[in-house]
Image (cartoon, helix red, strand yellow):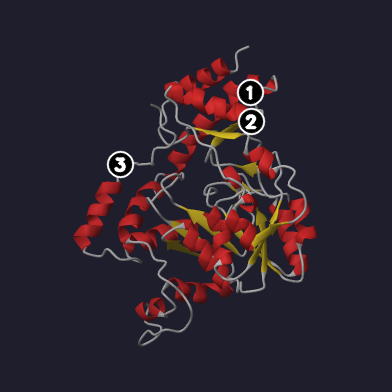
Amino acid sequence: MIPFNVPPMTGKEQHYIEQVIKNKKLSGDGRFTQACQAWIEEKYFCQKALLTTSCTHALEMAAMLAGIGPGDEVIMPSYTFVSTANAFVLQGATIVFVDIRPDTMNIDETLIEDAITDKTKAIVPVHYAGVACEMDTINAIADQYGITVIEDAAQGMMSVYKGQALGTLGRLGCYSFHETKNYSSGEGGALLINHEGDQYRSEIIREKGTNRSQFFRGQVDKYSWVDVGSSFLPSELNAAYLYAQLEHAGGINEDRLMSWQTYFNELKPLADEDRIQLPHVPDHCQHNAHMFYIKAKDLNERTALIDYLKDNEIMTAFHYVPLHSSMAGQTFGRFHGEDCYTTRESERLLRLPLYYHLEEKDVYYIIKTIKDFYKP
């Protein structure tokens, strides 16, 4: 069976984890945590990067830093993972969902302005499949109305929009290092601080509302509870696993891009015949091959294709059931405007296996099997 995903490994993970155990420093903010954060800061020129236990927690920290509270509204796509919405609902906000673009599956930037009210506090673009949202337009709208932009870049590490890394284009950016992501610590994430004014409070929120980080740097003579916060620090064991991959980030990226491009080139004839649709990457975007998906004609065809691939020992996956159609989505949010594409496109999309060291012969077998399914 060809699995849908295999967590990435470079070979140094066990060695680094053993170093952590030997040093008897398992809790957060040790040497490997600091190394991972420094790598992100130097690679992406962000003001500050803070590892977290998950992208979910990075989003929750971002909501707290942005001052989201009861009565506020937050605009985002409905086609996203539940954490995108939960982070703001936990602070008492109402979620305002808008439709997506059918080409990139990202939020339709042309619909955002009409969804803004005097209660709108933030816009949360989600960079689906590591392909950037139209951030120039989104940031211009946010600047005009004095609204915070928080990027959900869970799938976007190593992707670029007009020369700038995803996660660094808004006030705050959030990465995921879940085992399904290009770079993994099993569970994990990072919050990117792009404005200097957020640095001090972000450390406090991450340290359970205390100024413990400042204490360890000798900036205060004792630490105490000074603000709201929670326990957002990952273990050094997670950071050690992650650092082994960050050291090899370029090689992982190239390997995934090769598989992605093979899928695209070999399946393009089916797309040219209008049998399937392939991913669209705008010219000004560089993606990270986080996923490769195809779109079938409709839900019935996708279901049949999933079953056919499984019968041929290929595991696939589809993605989100739109949040606005869920019970919680209807309780905590509303859909603004018409759902032209969110539901329709979500029912067509099928993700193919894509992971580091996916064998070329397996890629070609998957391609052949898809072509066999669509034979007249």
Q: What element carries label 2?
A: loop
**Residue 354 placement, left or right of 329:** left
Q: Return the disc, 3 or 2, that comes first in the chain's sequence.
A: 3
> For mark 3, does the 10 Å Cα neighbourhood hold few (<14), some (14 to 19), or many (20 or more) residues?
few
User: Which residue extends farthest right?
Assistant: 114
Q: Is mark 1 on a helix, strand or loop?
A: helix
Question: From what the image shows, is residue 52 above or below residue 158?
Answer: below
Cα gap from disc 1 to disc 3, whole angstroms: 35 Å
**Residue 145 placement, left or right of 242:** right
Q: Do the residues labelled 1 and 3 touch (CB within 8 Å)?
A: no
For label 3, the residue is: 11
Q: Are marks 1 and 2 in contact (CB under 8 Å)?
A: yes
Q: Which amino acid does label 3 sit on?
A: Gly
Which of the numbered marks, if any, corresponds to residue 268? 1
The residue positioned 64% from the left and 55% from the top of the image is 125
On the image, the x and y values in percent for residue 325 come to 63, 50
On the image, the x and y values in percent for residue 56 come to 49, 59
Looking at the picture, tell me which residue is in the foreground, 31 or 186.
186
Q: What residue type is labelled 1?
A: Lys
